[in-house]
Image (cartoon, helix red, strand yellow):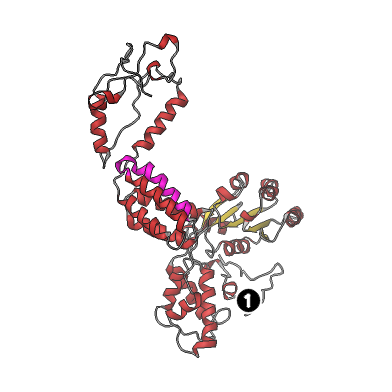
Amino acid sequence: MQTPDLFIQEDRKPFKISHDMPLASRMRPRRLEEFVGQAHLMGKGEVLERLIHQDAFGSFIFYGPPGTGKTTLAHLIAQVSHRRFIPLSAVTSNVTDLRRALEEARKFLSRGERTILFVDEIHRFNKAQQDVLLPHIENGTVAFMGATTHNPFFSIVAPLVSRSQVYRLKSLTVEEVRKILEAALKDEARGLGKKGLKLEEGVLEYLAHFSEGDARRALNLLEMLDQMQSSESKGQPLSKEMVLKLVQEKPVHYDWDEDEHYDTISAFIKSVRGSDPDAALYWLAKMLEGGEDILFIARRLVILASEDIGNADPQGLTLATSCLRAVQFIGLPEARIPLAQATVYLACAPKSNAAYLAIDKALEAVRENRVQKVPAHLKNVKAPDEKGFSYQYSHDFEGHFVEQDYLERPQNFLQLSDNGYELEMAKRLNAWRKYPKKTFEKPFSKPEKI
């Protein structure tokens, strides 16, 4: 199937591509055949590729990192479908713009022409603005397409998500980014083919790695290198050192309240829990480089020290809380050191979630069953008819242990692991549990101690 040119207007005349436009805009794919990446969606026979060519799609939400082709894909779909295409940006548009576009779509539908309404950065619309779309999607006035870098299941209202098919776009591979860069270097009409940009061996590969799967970033860097060669290098091939000079430092894609935040802290915690200090340090470094709140990291280490290590190594919680205080006290950049120390210690410590499981079982027992009364011999103040029940003070007995009930109905919540210090705890507990429990009804001769 021959797909039409992306740079074609409604009157079928091509847009004029100006070299004043950024390289990334000039090199935007004109046809589906030029689209690079997302093989899981756009590969031959894959679901989205079939829906596009059959013009059988409804409403879509494209979700993924920057520079992966979300907006480009929406434009290409519109061209293939031959539907009217109304693009909006949630950054610059408001409800008035949205209602005007929907009214326009309604008028064209009455003439038998269908419309695609595309909203870029859809997560920027608030709930009320997103709700405006719902009835028009429901009655078929528009086929809706949205693009977002934020997880739509958190950032977009549930009714809109339920009316749309969500497709997740992935970061481009190094090979895919390199292919895009090579196309820009060769293209004489839209790219840098006439410029004669010279790059040392390995620079293109380095750019592809450096861009972190973002085609727009890669093309922007390539364009800046072209400008640098024109002004500084006097025709000499550009090196990796020139790339570093240009960008100063490698950008790390990281958001503080969306997927990258939650996914990275999840990977960090699971690496510590899984006793892999190297992986844990890597995710810690990513969070530090991405600007994560260091107190958030330290607090999560405190939680982990109890939840995943517990009494297998009681020193873990001490170290984690000390790390939290140190981080509060010294701040960055030095705070990276106690954070790394605590991360390594906890990753290498013996693991147990016995305390975590035990308290959850105890809470379940309190919530779901009749709450037990405090046995008379354990009460602080006894009623007159309870005076005969005496508490036995453990330290007055051999081994600092005495047979005695502490619940009306005995429970067994704690199951210690066979790891670390819990081995010693289990030996004592198993010995104590061999004794039958009993309530002493005779007054104890010594004064009671609370």
Please give the range of residues in magenta: 294-314
What residue type is disc 1 on?
Met
State the image coordinates of residue 280 (x, y, percent, origin top left). Answer: 37, 55
Can you say which quadrant of the picture contains the N terminus?
A: bottom right
Residue at point 61%, 69% (across, down): 6
Up/down of 25 relative to 51, above or below: below
Asked whether 306 falls inside the magenta stretch, the response is: yes
Main SS, magenta region, reads helix
Indicate the quadrant where residue 412 lies. Answer: top left
Asked if the stretch drawn in magenta spans residue 377, the answer is: no
Q: Residue at x 24, y 29 (%)?
A: 430
Q: Nearer the viewer, residue 332 or 284?
A: 332
Q: Residue 26 appears at what percent x and percent y?
A: 59, 74
Q: Identify the image quadrant of the C terminus.
A: top left
In the image: residue 33, left or right of residue 265: right
- Mark 1 element type: loop
- Residue closer to the observer: 246 or 409: 409
Q: Where in the figure is residue 176, as x and y percent of width and height? A: 45, 68
For mark 1, does the 10 Å Cα neighbourhood hold few (<14), some (14 to 19), or many (20 or more) residues?
few
Q: Quadrant of residue 317?
A: top left
Q: Identify residue for label 1.
A: 21
